[in-house]
């Protein structure tokens, strides 16, 4: 069986006891192991938190029968966008390509979101969009970004309560680096955050850390 957390010998033993005898109380498990209930408490807490065991009041502990990978999948499918979103950088659609390039460097981001006068999302500018516009001897000060941006309705968006895994799917399917987190307002789509490949990598690291309780 694939385990996502490394269980120690005693925890494996407890798991086996509950598997064979559950439902069983903490007291009864302690007796079988010749230990006190207090000594067992942290192990039982870990096994319950990790999802291997379930505790029911006045009945005792049950073996859930879930494998490590099932538990990991369940955990991944609970992560929401707002737990990982970072601050978005926006520019107005009338700014020049030159100024957008400066903003990208100054703000140290790989994607800029473009808004109209009302603050509503109308476009996206990636590094390559700006590089493409810079090829040739064009006057970058004279070209507004709304000429070169990817525009609505072709922009993949998400909301703060969406599942992070669904955004991961959009990033892979559309082969993009980031997705704006938007909030619908009377003025349109307000950009309140962004999810990038870096945020995804952070989520992956946190999951890996979590498994090493
Ligand atoms: P780069 O172009 O620097 O490799 P991306 O892969 O993010 O960066 O962008 C690829 C193309 O997709 C660009 O033309 C960009 O405007 C567009 N794009 C970026 N993000 C989105 C998005 N969330 N929805 C739709 N199109 C996007």
Image: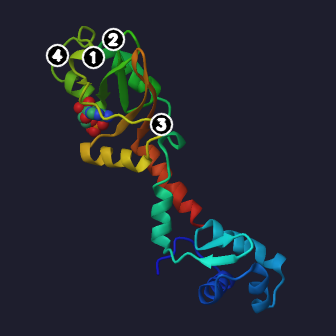
Residue density around tag 3, few if under 14, some if 14–19, many if 20 or more, within 10 Å: many
Helix, strand or loop for disc 2? loop
10 left or right of 89? right
* Separation (CA) of disc 2 from disc 1: 6 Å
Q: x, y percentage for residue 82?
A: 51, 39
Which callout, 3 or 4, points at the residue further toward the start of the chain? 4
Q: Which mark is residue 95?
A: 2
Between marks 3 and 1 in the image, the one whose residue lies nearer the viewer: 3
**Does 179 appear above or below 140?**
below
Between marks 1 and 4 in the image, the one whose residue lies nearer the viewer: 1
Task: Report the front residue among 92 and 134.
Answer: 92
Q: x, y percentage for residue 33?
A: 76, 90
Image quadrant occupied by the C terminus: bottom right
* Separation (CA) of disc 2 from disc 3: 28 Å
Measuring 28% from the left and 10% from the top, which residue is drawn there? 141
Tag 3 near tag 1, CB within 8 Å: no
Residue 149: which quarter of the image?
top left
The residue labelled by disc 3 is 160
Residue density around tag 1, few if under 14, some if 14–19, many if 20 or more, within 10 Å: many
* Separation (CA) of disc 3 from disc 4: 41 Å
| Ligand 1 picture quarter | top left
Which callout, 4 or 2, points at the residue further toward the start of the chain? 2
Note whether residue 128 is visible: no
36 left or right of 108? right
* Number of marks in the rendered image: 4
**Does 46 appear above or below 196?**
below
211 left or right of 11? left
């Amino acid at each position: 069986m694939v385990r996502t957390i490394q269980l120690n010998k005693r925890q494996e033993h407890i798991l086996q006891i509950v598997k064979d005898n559950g439902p069983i109380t903490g007291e009864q498990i302690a007796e079988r192991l010749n230990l006190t209930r207090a000594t067992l408490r942290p192990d039982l807490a870990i096994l319950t938190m990790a999802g291997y065991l379930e505790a029911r009041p006045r009945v005792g502990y049950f073996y859930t029968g879930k494998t490590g990978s099932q538990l990991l999948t369940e955990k991944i499918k609970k992560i929401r966008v707002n737990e990982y979103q970072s601050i978005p950088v926006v520019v107005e659609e009338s700014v020049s390509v030159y100024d957008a390039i400066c903003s990208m460097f100054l703000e140290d981001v790989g994607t800029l979101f473009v808004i109209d006068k009302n603050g509503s999302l109308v476009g996206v500018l990636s590094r390559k969009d700006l590089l493409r516009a810079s090829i040739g001897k064009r006057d970058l000060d004279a070209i507004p970004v709304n000429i070169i941006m990817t525009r609505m309705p072709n922009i993949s968006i998400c909301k703060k309560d969406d599942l992070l895994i669904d955004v991961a799917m959009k990033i892979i399917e559309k082969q993009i680096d980031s997705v704006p987190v938007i909030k619908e307002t009377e003025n349109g789509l307000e950009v309140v955050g962004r999810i990038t490949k870096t945020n995804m990598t952070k989520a992956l690291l946190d999951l890996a850390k979590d498994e090493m309780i």
